[in-house]
Amino acid sequence: MSDPVLLDVRNLSVEFSMARSRMGLGPPRSLSAVSDVSMRVAAGETVGLVGESGSGKSTFGRAILRLGEVTAGEVFLDGQDMARARREDLARLRRETAMIFQDPYGSLNPRLTVRQAIGEVLYVHGKVGPGAAEARIAELLDLVGLDPALMDRRPGDLSGGQCQRVGIARALAIEPRLIVADECVAALDVSIQGQIINLLMELGQRMHLGMIFIAHDLAMVRRLCDRIAVMYLGRIVEEGPTEEVFKDPRHPYTRSLIEAIPEIDPARGLPSAPLPGEPPSPVDLPQGCAFHPRCPLARPECCAAVPPLVGPRAHRAACILAPGGRLNEAGGNLSETLSATPHERTMTC
Ligand SMILES: Nc1ncnc2c1ncn2[C@@H]1O[C@H](COP(=O)(O)OP(=O)(O)OP(=O)(O)O)[C@@H](O)[C@H]1O
Ligand SMILES: [Mg+2]
C-alpha cells in the first residue's frame, strides 16, 4: 500500500441493544454486530469485504460512513476521527464519501427523473454553478456508460443495470474519495454484473478512489479487489492481498468459502466438505474463536480466547493454527500444522 492511507478504522465495534426475553426477565441483552474491527484503505485501493449473511458487513460499512451507529472505536478519514465527528465534520464526511446500495430501484426515488436525481446531489453539495448542471449530468451519465438522452426517464423506465449506473453516477456526483459499495451488483443479471464491475474498476483507477466492496461473490471480489477482508460473526478472521488469500487461505473459514466457489477450478467439482451448519447467534457467541463449533480443524485450545489477527507481513489470520498463531510458530500452512499436531476431533468447550 504505497498510496497514503485514506481511511483508517481502529477497533470499531457496533452493538445493538435487544429486547429482554419475552418474560421480561434477565439483564438487557446486546448483539455484537461488529467487534473490534480495524481496516485501512488507501486512495486508489479497493478492499473486498466478504462473509456469510449476518457477519456484519453492512453494519460495518454504514458505521464508517456514520450512516449507522458506532459503539466504540475510531474511524479516521485523512487523520480526522469521524466516529466522534460533529455536525460540520460530518458534512465533510458526506462530501467525501458515498455508498452504493444493492437494490438499484429501491435506492432511487421513483418520482424523480434521472436529471432530478443527479441534479439534487449536485445542488445539495454545491458542485455546480447556475446553468452548469445539465452539462455535468450529461458528463456523469457518459462516465457511467449511459446515454445522456435517458436524462428525462424515471427509474421505472430503466433496466436494473441502468438504474445501478444512475446510482453510481449519483455517488460520483459528489466527487467522493471513498465509496462503500454494498452488494451493489447482487440484484443484477450476471452479464450486467460483469459490466458494472468493469465500470467500478475503471472508475476506481481513473478517479483514484478508495473503495470497500462488500460482496458474497468471491470470484467477483477476486477480479476487482486489491485486498480482501473476511468477516465471521462481526470479526475479521483473515485479511491480505487478494491473490495471496485465494492461493493460500490461512483461516479454515476462508478456506471453506474459497472451496465452495465452483468457478475457481471447474475441474475440481463440488467442495469435498461444505461448511456444516449455520453461524451461531451473535447474541450468544461461543467462547474463544466464534468459528470453532463449525471448524473442521477445531481443538480444545480454540475455546480459550478470541485469537488475534496474526501473520507475516500483510496477510494475517485469526487462527491459532495459521502461520504466527499460538500453535503454529513454525509458520507452516494449515495442512502441515495439522499433520504435525494430531488431535481428537471431539470438542468440549
Ligand atoms: N438495526 C439493527 N438492530 C438489531 N440488529 C441488527 C440491526 N442491523 C443489523 N443487525 C444484526 O447485526 C448482524 C449483522 O448484520 P449485517 O446486516 O451487518 O450483516 P451482513 O454481513 O451485511 O449480512 P448480509 O450478507 O445478509 O447483507 C446480524 O445479526 C443482524 O441481524
Ligand atoms: Mg449486508
Image (cartoon, helix red, strand yellow):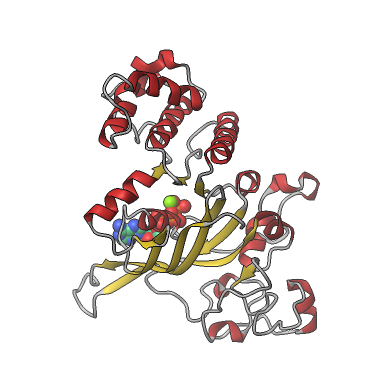
Extreme residue in the left direction: 24
Could you say where residue 156 lies in the image, as x and y percent from the top left? 35, 21
Corner quadrant of residue 151: top left
Tell me what residue is drawn at x 65 percent, y 80 percent.
325
- On the image, the x and y values in percent for residue 152 come to 34, 15
Q: Percent x, y for residue 187?
A: 47, 36
Residue pictured at 44% horizontal, 68% vertical: 10
Using the rendered view, name the quadrant where residue 251 is placed.
Answer: bottom right
Residue 58, x across and y down, in percent: 41, 53
- What residue is shown at x 27% (from left), y 68% (from top)? 17
Q: Look at the picture and state if 265 lies above or below 194.
A: below
Q: Relative to residue 35, is residue 260 drawn left or right?
A: right
Horizontal side of residue 326 vs 109, given as left or right = right
The one of 281 and 311 positioned closer to us in this rendering: 311
Quadrant of res 307: bottom right
Q: Quadrant of the N terminus?
A: bottom right
Is residue 88 in sight in this rendering? yes
- Is residue 335 depicted above or below 262 in this figure? below
